[in-house]
Structure formats: C-alpha cells, structure tokens
Amino acid sequence: MFDGNHPPNGDRQNDGDNKIKSLLIFLIFLGIFSLFVGSKDYRFRGEEPTRLVMAYEMSYKGSFFQPTYLGEEYYRKPPLINWLIIASSNVWDWNKFTGRFISILASLLTALVIYLFGKMYIFKEDLPSILSSVIFLSFIDVVFWYGFLIEIDMTLTLIAISLIFCMIVAFEKKSYLLFLVSGILTGFAFLLKGFPAFVFLGATYVALMIYHIFVKNFCIRFLSGFLLSILFSIVPIVLWVLNLDHPKEYISVLWGESFGRVNQSKDFSKFISHLVFYPLLNVKQTLLVSIVFIIFAAIKKWKLEIKNNRMMFIILIVFLINYIPYWISAGARGRYILPLLPMVALMFAYFFYHLGRDRIIKILAGVIAFTFMVRIIVGLFYFPYETSKKDHYSKISKQIYSKITHQGEIVSDCDVHKGLIYYLDIMTGKMITTERVNPDWKYYISCYKKVDGKLIGSYKIKSDIINLYERER
C-alpha cells in the first residue's frame, strides 16, 4: 500500500521512471506554452477590459489605491489585480497581453506550489508531484479559460492555495511564523477578491481543528496561531483602507459583492438545483482528467484509501470544508472553486499513482497531451477566426480615433462597452471619463442619449448604436 513514503512498485529511480518524469516535465512546458498561443490577440471575454481600463486609469492618474472606471470611483473589486497589471505594463506595454500575462504567470507558479507541497509533504517523490502539477494545468477551466484570461481567479488561486498549504504546514510544525505568513496571504487574497479570502482562512482552520481534535493532537498554539493569522491578515487591508477617500462605501459594496449571492439559496428550488448540478459543473471544469478518473474508478471498483496517507487525508478534509460554502450557495459559480482545484489535482495524482505508474500514467499523459494540443490548435486557428468576427471594439475604436483631432477631452456614457473605452484610452494616450467628471468635453461617445453637439460618426456594436459627437466651440 502506497503511503507516500514506500512506493508500491519498488525503486522509483529506474530508467522507466526517468522517462515518465521527462514526459511529464515536457507536458508542463507544453501546457504553459499552450496558454500563450493566441492569447495576445484573442478578443476580450467578460470583464477583461474592465480590469485593463481600471489599471490604465490608476497608472494615468498616478493614484494607486482607489480604482476608477471612466474616472468615477469603482467599489466592486479591491485594487491588487490593477497593481499587477500596471507592473506587467512595464514589460509588455498596454495591450491585451498586459493582463493575460498575469494569469499565465500565476498558472505556472500555482503548478510550482503544487509540486513543492506534493514533494515535501505528501508523496516525498518527484514523479507523482510533477503529475499533480500537470493535471492541474490540464483542467479545462485552467487551460481554456482562467489560465490566461484577464480575471482575478488564477491569481487568487495562487494566493489562496498558498495560504491553505501554509496553514496546513503551520499546524504540522506548530509554527507561529507560518501562521503569520498565512495571515498575510489572506490579506493579499482580500485585496484581490474581498471578504471570501476569510472564508478560505476560516474553513481551512476549522478543517484542521476537526482533524487534530479527532486524532487527539490538539494544541493551544493552534488557537493563538490562528489569532496571529487574523491579526496579520488585517495589516495589508488596513494599509490600503487608510488611503481611501470613502472607505465605508468601499467596504459596504465589497460586502454586498462577496455575500450577495448567498441570498439566492433562500429560493428552495434554486438551492436544490444547485446542490445537484454544481458538482456536475465541477466535473466539467476538471475535464478531461475527471472523466478518466471516473472511468478507472468504475472499472477498478477502487476506493480512495487516503487514510493510509495522513497528509492526503488532511487535504481531503480541507477540500471538503472549503467546498461546502460554495456547494450550499445557490449563487456560487463554477470559477469560485478554482482555488480548490490544486487539491483536486493532488487527489487525482494520488489515485492514478496508486493504481500503478507505467501504463495508467502513460494513458493519462496521452489524454493530457491531447488537451494541450487541442488548446494550441484552438489558439492558432479558432481564436483568430472568432476575433475577426466578433472583435468589434478594436475596429470601431480605430474608426472613432480617425475622427478626432486629438485635442480636447473625450467623455463617454458607454459603461457597457468597456473594450471600446480601453482601446481609445491607449490610442489617444488620454483617459476617457464620464461627463460628470469632465463637463468641459470636446468629444462625446454616446450609447444612450442624444448629445448637444455635432454628430460626426455613428457605429453599430451588436444591437447598440454608438454615436460620436463633437462640441462646437
């Protein structure tokens, strides 16, 4: 029985193992490479341009604590992702890849964190630890979506799983230093996501307390260590809040953003539907490895006897306790559990490695290689095709840019078409605002109303008409 210290099949340093390790390392590079393919030019998805516009405005104004959109204060997200995008802009300049590089780098670092934790505390070997990293990178939600999109989710995954692993080791070593570090990481997670950062900290602590009380290993240092974590988690938050002009409004909106979806669970039908279908959504998020897992689990009629590996058992408990808040919240989306997927990758790796390394791991490697190759093909061919058909913003922004004289201020009420705003920001080198922020405007880009000025251009984005007005002085 494999317990993390005694491999099931003898010496793991033979030539066969080395070949498999080489294959898995190659797959890691292939997976990271796949995230780059097509990412520079692929059209905006979702809230990507929102992140870029806010980061650009912060950089333009030199005001780095209060995010704004169209010059007006924006309270729905903390500013850390904006800071990272600004730092990235010093490397890549202002373009789509400015923000996407942050997620790709976070994907790579998360894979590294998974490897290090697996090697040091679970498997004590390279091969299954590397396998865990490869599995994580191959998850559909990572390789096709959040592993490269300009969203906070992959960066949050890196920070959240680091604080979870740090808390686990803090309990193992009874280390105040690691409790402190886990607290600081929680503070950084708050600056990305808001109050859910404390859910990761609290749920992980509860899970670890349950385990250590059950095995009769309770220590008063666990309580004082957690208080230390809470104390130091507040430090980054307080340093930020003290620099805000309207901290009460900001914190109030963040609270509503963080926990507003919980209220949807009051609808009994939505609650039951979520309980049933959310795990199925999670299976979809972890394709194709999850399908291979289900097939082998059914064929082998195998039970995941993780109690034989104490640390893996702890990982399972921590995962389940962290998962429950999202499972019972009818408003929770699939991406909310992305920070928990590194633990899923570790459990999958334990399962496949336990079955026997050579044939099964090679089958799994083939499935993962197929996933990465499909992502590369999609990036090479489908992304350009979809962008050419749907990337209205870059085309229309060029047309608008050709109509303006580059003198005078530009305002807009097009708060929905954020991609348009971002392109015009970087084309003009200005900061487009609302009329409230800058009533003395020269050009008005209107999505909603007729403006007192000369209509010099009219454009269509989907079903919306965008009008460009010039104020005659």
Image (spheres, grey):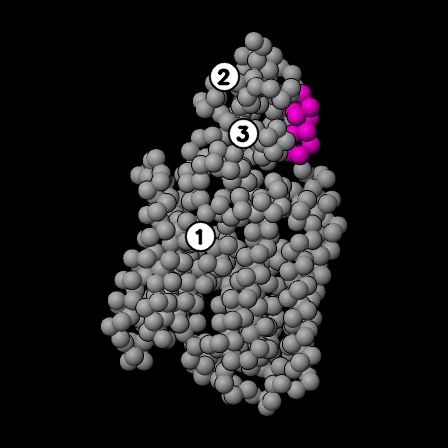
Q: Does the magenta stretch include residue 397?
A: yes
Q: Name the residue under label 2.
A: 440
Q: Is mark 1 on a helix, strand or loop?
A: loop
N-terminal label among 2 and 3: 3
Residue 116 x, y percent position in the rendering:
51, 71
Q: Kindly identify the amino acid type of the residue bearing the numbered disc 3.
A: Met
Q: Residue 323 carries which label?
A: none
Q: Is the magenta stretch mostly helix, strand or loop?
A: helix
x then y, percent, for residue 203: 36, 63
* Residue at image mark 1: 332
Within 10 Å of the Cα at label 1, are there few (<14), some (14-19), or many (20+) other Cα atoms? Answer: some
The amino acid at mark 1 is Ala
* Residue in front for this viewpoint, 416 or 60: 60
Q: Residue at x 45, y 84 (%)?
A: 308
Residues drawn in magenta: 392-403
Closer mark to the observer between disc 3 and disc 1: 3
- Residue at the spot x=32%, y=80% of the render? 215
Q: Which residue type carries mark 2?
A: Asp
Q: Which of 465 and 440 is in front in this view?
A: 440
Asked whether the beta carbons under mark 2 and mark 3 sit within 8 Å of each other, the answer is no
Q: Distance between the residues labelled 1 and 2?
A: 43 Å
User: Where does label 3 land, which residue?
Assistant: 431
Label whose residue precedes the other's in the sequence (1 or 2): 1
Distance between the Cα atoms at labels 2 and 3? 14 Å
Q: Is mark 3 on a helix, strand or loop?
A: loop
Q: Looking at the image, which residue sits at the far left?
A: 220
